[in-house]
Amino acid sequence: MSKKGRENKEINEIIRSDDNWEPVGYTPMPQITDLRNWDFRLMETYKPFYAPFCDLCCFCTFGKCDLTGNKKGACGIDIASQQARFVLVACCMGTAAHAAHGRHLIDFLIDKYGEDYKIDLGQQVDIEAPIIRTVMGLKPQTLGDLRKAIEYVERGLVHAVSSTHMGQEGSSQDFESKSLHMGMLDHVALEASDLAQIVGFKFPTSVSDTPLVDLGWGSVDKSKPTITCVGHNAAAATVLIDYLRNNDLYDKVEVTGICCTAHDIARYSERGKIIGPLSKQLFFLKTGLADVIMTDEQCVRSDIPQLAREVGSALIATSDKICYGLPDVSKKSIDEIVRMIIDEGKQVLILDINKAGEVAARVAVEIAPKRIKEILNKELAQELTKECRNCAMCNRVCPNLLDVGTAIAETGKGNFELLSLLFDQCVGCGKCEEICPRNIPIIKVMQAGASWDTYKVRTGRGPVHDVEIRKVGAPIVLGTIPGIVAFVGCSNFPQDIEEIAVMAEEFAKRKFIVALSGCAAMAAGFKKDAEGKTIYEKYPPDFDAGGVLNVGSCVANAHIVGAAIKVANIFAKLPIRANFEVIADYILNRVGACGVAWGAYSQKAAAIGTGCNRWGIPVVLGPHASKYRRLYLSDKGEGDWSVMDGRERQIVDTQEPSPEHLAMVIENKERAMVTITKLCIRKNDTAQGRQLKLYHYISLHRNYIGGLPDDLQNFVRNEKDIPIFYKKDVMEYLKGVGWQPKPALTLPTLIETYDSDVPLDAVIK
Amino acid sequence: MSKKGRENKEINEIIRSDDNWEPVGYTPMPQITDLRNWDFRLMETYKPFYAPFCDLCCFCTFGKCDLTGNKKGACGIDIASQQARFVLVACCMGTAAHAAHGRHLIDFLIDKYGEDYKIDLGQQVDIEAPIIRTVMGLKPQTLGDLRKAIEYVERGLVHAVSSTHMGQEGSSQDFESKSLHMGMLDHVALEASDLAQIVGFKFPTSVSDTPLVDLGWGSVDKSKPTITCVGHNAAAATVLIDYLRNNDLYDKVEVTGICCTAHDIARYSERGKIIGPLSKQLFFLKTGLADVIMTDEQCVRSDIPQLAREVGSALIATSDKICYGLPDVSKKSIDEIVRMIIDEGKQVLILDINKAGEVAARVAVEIAPKRIKEILNKELAQELTKECRNCAMCNRVCPNLLDVGTAIAETGKGNFELLSLLFDQCVGCGKCEEICPRNIPIIKVMQAGASWDTYKVRTGRGPVHDVEIRKVGAPIVLGTIPGIVAFVGCSNFPQDIEEIAVMAEEFAKRKFIVALSGCAAMAAGFKKDAEGKTIYEKYPPDFDAGGVLNVGSCVANAHIVGAAIKVANIFAKLPIRANFEVIADYILNRVGACGVAWGAYSQKAAAIGTGCNRWGIPVVLGPHASKYRRLYLSDKGEGDWSVMDGRERQIVDTQEPSPEHLAMVIENKERAMVTITKLCIRKNDTAQGRQLKLYHYISLHRNYIGGLPDDLQNFVRNEKDIPIFYKKDVMEYLKGVGWQPKPALTLPTLIETYDSDVPLDAVIK
Amino acid sequence: MSLPYHYVNVLTGTKSCKVLEDATEVAGLIKKANRPLLVIGPLCASLELEGCCLMEFGARIAQAGKLPVVATANTRKKLLELGVTPDSTYDVVEIINHLKKPDWKGVKGEGNHDLVIFLGIRADLANQGLSTLKHFAPHLKTLTLCKFLHPHAAYSLPNLKDNKWKDILESVINSFTENN
Amino acid sequence: MSLPYHYVNVLTGTKSCKVLEDATEVAGLIKKANRPLLVIGPLCASLELEGCCLMEFGARIAQAGKLPVVATANTRKKLLELGVTPDSTYDVVEIINHLKKPDWKGVKGEGNHDLVIFLGIRADLANQGLSTLKHFAPHLKTLTLCKFLHPHAAYSLPNLKDNKWKDILESVINSFTENN
């Protein structure tokens, strides 16, 4: 879509196009249709795969409309388009959550420091905002510039939401293109948000060995007043910590967090404690260990007011996103509010977070001494469960299909083994407890099955360093580092919370680069080896082969994508400014990165994952993600894998399905590890690199699936690709399946395989 | 929520607070929580009423969650909050549709005229933007100012969409408050959009007797090349008409429209023809009378590419909201595109509407001569239907529960009576045809049952004139004009399309002010009296007692709310600038207006209606609207109807349920007319006014329901309120039910009955 | 899975009506109720059932069962013609709104009702109203006497042909008169 | 309305499975198929059925019915131990993705399959995959042999207790051997 003069003028002003840090590329601040051809090209290879969660559409008052058997809705929509439309709605929700989050943080910090406050990420990071630079063409230098990024996202969001209205978009492919656009905008919001808090809250940056902080409900000192911050926006928590520091209270009070707010509390102060991910929210709040619960936004249970009442915790809501119908006391004096809470037992909404932080501290200190905090012991647990007749109603409502009943029944008999296992697999929704005909407080009972150890997690470190990229750029692109595996997203895990640590360690041992964020980064800390060490203590925190690093909260996911962009920019010297297609094409064909959202549950995760896909980064999802309704799958060996050879300037049928899929669901962790390895294969791998990748693919396949992969022939281009260690078997196998060497390739690219303004020369450096 | 310094500074700049046309009020550019207390106060009286459309929630991957029997979802949400959340999603979709629409129009016009292009609505309209003035505190003077309004909406939308994410808002009341906020922002977008097109496209303004234009498929001259524009955004159509004019083609070509684009085509040129509302879209497109179909945005069937192919119409999509997966040819030359369409039979996406208009014209002129256009005659219709065995599958899938089968079976026997009736009741979804086991082309068959008359509708006139308000302000507020009834919204009518005309005429006869817009305004034209006249021909087009006026397309709904605001401003001399609560309170208690969205189907309608509710305007909905999931109902006589008496400065229990509900669904038009009249009753009515309103209430009740209303005692404050005509009966009845006179009241207001910055003095003038 | 006649009413959930095929069951249910209420809708005025107006069945059920009647929309008029004076008239959403309050005084002022019987409300609107009561009025049961299955009702007749429907309504009426 | 065992799988729609209670019906269905396919999932490796591993039942069904086998996830390993070499291994969404293409060559290269039998895939994921095939693969039928009802399958066993489930699987196996 050719931009109008006015539009170009506006854009040039916003991105300061005369700043000559790089020439402005082909797509400055792309609008919703500007990268549509790229999306369509991706979908030629990676076709949307739909798993309808419902046969019907119920969006407008013509409905319900039955969409089975190719029937159309009253508006003419078909089942595929309705799924795609629903995915777009989810991506809009996710993107909006991050954009609103960023807007709040940035406005808060601009109030504090002014809009000219500089963005400085330390000596190790020059490319401060690879995503914003690539997508918008803007090199953000101040908080005000970050606000521009959020405004760009805000403006784009409206068009996407509009498209979900009845009688708008009619093509599933175009819905997908809009979702991919939302995903990309979501990443802009992520990056703007995390940069803002890094500079505004002075989070660690340009250091890799950030502190190891305490993790787990067991780390909470019950003797101290305890404040638990729940959500994703740490602004209020930072005010709280400042207040405690300024009043010499910090060592007398426990400041703890659940979900990403916890990560950012730890980034703000290493004394902050990380209780755990969303899946432990209900469990922990029901322990009553929190004297004050302070909620901000996102992934906060809707029933917290009720929960807080049950256990006598005070509740302060601090976000316009989550008001719980509570009285808005923002304009009252702090003394007044403290009294309301303590004397009248009121739960309150305080939208002025500068007040909220102090109120939380003062209330906690006052009420803690009056509260008794006791963890349920085994005797009591048995007492509470002995009425269980294993009627299995709990099993039927469990969203993770767990055998809750047997574990509880066994607990009633004094056997706690299954209870511990159950707790590790529990996603923490509380439905079992709710449905129990004998009113057994199942979640509470889990206190007797849970481990009360203190674990360790490394504090979020923010961006990958440019120097790190300089070191690993070549090995990644050549393939001699077998891949970057990023464990991200939520805690709706299909099985044991330990699975993240197990998978992460497997790849760390194999010298992949292992990056983590959000709930996944916490989950990875919940496993100790024989010496009592977590992976954060066992592996170096560097963005390098065999490193295990926590980038930070969900919004820090931007830095993982950012690292891939930096490879293109720093190692390959490709200009990134407003140059999305070139960079995404580079990542797709040359950067062996794979995202793993094993417990993805949220609309935010849908947006983040979809954004990764537009950048050319494949994403592996756990079984629950099948309920997102859409994946991007190729036809594997049977598809057309022709690309342009940039140097030869001709189309080459590579016959190589790499990367094989863009978004896929996998059943269990064993298979996942095999597939993740495969998804790190790229067309650009050198023989040496491919050997290494195939070595891991084969060895993991032998370990977990048995024998050689039956698609090996797809990934051996010629004999040089065959790992020495398996040479004999592989040769034999290839002979058996009539393998033939594949055409050689000098510079794989999709550019000029589809309609785009980008010339082939743009990808050749 | 107290605004930060930075925020105030920004707002003051945006609204130019030093412009001293009025002092800046209490809530300039309110954010999502700023009017929360007003909403909660409204909901004290008008409680949300939920009708869940589904027992479950399926929004995230923890689901599906069963919410029956007070069960909570995995996130803790309950069934009521989930309904409220769904309503908020709908309001976000609707608001986004209007905001994106406005953004597109305004950017298009700024490209053409520059951002300093003046807003001038003629001598009759000084208060150009009552909504924007009241909500934002901005007096928009240029297109650039209107863009500010859209930007304000865009920014607000993000927070609302964010709140619908899992783990955000947990209270149904707060979800409602956010929906009400979205509704208010939606009205800002509506007003900005229509003002932009009035000034940009030079639509009629400051005139009431706008031209009467042709209405109906029967008005199309089959011998001429015909272009049909479908949707809501007339920008492309105006380019088309300009091209035709400049090339002397306009009298040789038929430019027609379906849905609101049609209204705006007619506003742009009285030679434009209005085919009809959404419910006739499928019917008309299947006639093949359109040589070229040009789609823009909103309420456009998703299957138009397929429909166009079936009948050999060319298709040009022109909006980034609706791309249909078509090739984007925006950058190709017009000649090239025309050839693609004609020689290659391509359907295309042209996002440069300056090109789209010309392409449409040239293609139509070229292909029309080659196409045969014939309407199905009765013989053929009988032939096509004689296979019908009335298996009633069509009845089961009909979203309007119509007996399609019998009508088709009868047609097969040569009896077309039922077919004609069916056509008038058909909402035009096409499910019957799709499901028919005998593949009877039912929608096509309706050509033989449809009337092919040409009807008349008055062109949309835009804003109500300040002079009109000066004239009717007093009678409205005193009650001597019994009410303003606004028929708005879509064509998902429960019964006959003629119902709108019937109801509108009943109120016109009774000297109410009858305003219409959108599909309802078209529907009202589809009925002729014995002399062949439509209501537009029979009643004066003035905003005055007994007038019938069409304000225009959906976005013109802003002018109806705007009229209510102007009453407060012009008649009551209340300052409106950034003064939402004062004005909404005034409207709620003193302006007897009622909106009627009899065929509401869309998310836009949900947003518009919810917006009206926040302004204090009750809305009556048809049966299908029960599927919106939420209404606002009072406890009628059993509720607490205490208000503040502004002059006496004391709370008075009025015992009077007026207005009785804010959002309600009614079963049929007979009941609707009675209830609408009742909903025009206001606490401020003078005895004379109340007599008049009760006269109509009683007389309509006697006509349609029989006898006296059994809630009459609720609305008679003292004997002076009793209409002379019914005095005897009423006195007798009141005696029977033990009626007692109610406390007198000088100045009814909700101000100071809830927590607000607005002092009582603000409502006393 | 039993589908309702109209696809717009297909249940998406877990809690569906108990289908009553047998008139005596229906009558028994009504007799057992302490404070039953009959809600008669406007379709009763427009629908013909085997040659006589559905409203007559509504009126006869009310009389035979001595049921208090709410006339929704404009049904009152027709009822009056048939010599039945409804105990009250409401818009259908209004009566449902009252019914969902456990402490509502009821149309007789004797307290809220424990069984609410619906006849003659268009299927889509009726099903939405029944959903409201299903979710928010655990203190009462709903019963529909209409021709079509209502998934959200507590008790519903199955989808019926006119003759079968008439038979059921007739025998419901008789079962009252017999035992009185 | 028959609810699936797991509430997350409750059907929201119009097209539900035919429930097969009778093993001979199940076997007949499989025998009638021209190109059946057995998809064995990882739960077969972890689930015990009356003392023996579910995988053994999968293996015996494959052998008795001479069914081509797809092993999803990591099931291949266990199958090999049991002496069954699966005809191919796929991630479950991959095999479903192939199956939905009418012109897919099938695991034997003989063309796409007309009946796809599932055993041992977690209920929520399985039901989503079955939904894909229900909506987008009209050219084939699906059958689940799992312990729990799968609404999106064309044919499904009812929710079963272990002993009953075992009986059905056993008799399915026998019905093959008998008639061969």
Image (cartoon, coloured by chain):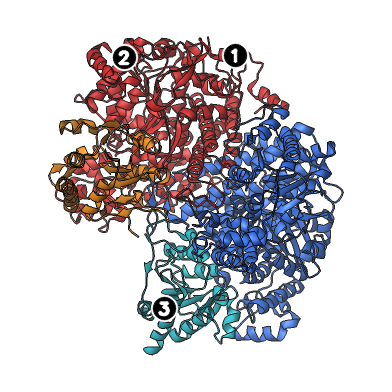
Chain colours: A red, B blue, C cyan, D orange
Which numbered circle lies on residue A692? Answer: 2
The residue nearer to you, when weighing B747 against B626, is B626
Measured in 3D between alpha carbons, the distance from the residue under mark 1 to the one under mark 2, in whole angstroms, is 36 Å
On what subunit does the disc labeled 1 rest? A
Which numbered circle lies on residue C93? Answer: none
- Judged from the image, the secondary structure of the residue bearing numbered disc 1 is loop
- Judged from the image, the secondary structure of the residue bearing numbered disc 2 is helix
Which numbered circle lies on residue A22? Answer: 1
Q: Judge whether A713 appears above or below A350 on screen.
A: above
Please tell me how crowded label 1 is: few (under 14), some (14-19), or many (20+) other residues with Cα within 10 Å.
some
Query: In the rendered structure, which disc, 1 or 2, sits on the residue that comes first in sequence?
Result: 1
Q: Judge whether A206 appears above or below B479 on screen.
A: above
On what subunit does the disc labeled 2 rest? A
Label 2 amino acid? Leu
Label 3 amino acid? Ile
Measured in 3D between alpha carbons, the distance from the residue under mark 3 to the one under mark 2, in whole angstroms, is 77 Å
Q: Judge whether A161 appears above or below B627 on screen.
A: above
Residue drawn at the location 33% of the way across and 12% of the way down: A721
Q: Is residue A299 left or right of residue A395?
A: right
Q: Is residue B99 left or right of residue C79?
A: right
Which numbered circle lies on residue C168? Answer: 3
Q: Locate residue A91, reporting x and y percent.
A: 50, 38
Q: Locate residue A548, reporting x and y percent.
A: 34, 21
Quadrant for residue A480, please give it.
top left
Q: Quadrant of the N terminus of chain A?
A: top right
Q: Locate residue D63, reporting x and y percent.
A: 18, 39
Foreground: disc 1 or disc 2: 2
The residue nearer to you, when weighing B683 against A316, is B683
Measured in 3D between alpha carbons, the distance from the residue under mark 3 to the one under mark 1, in whole angstroms, is 82 Å
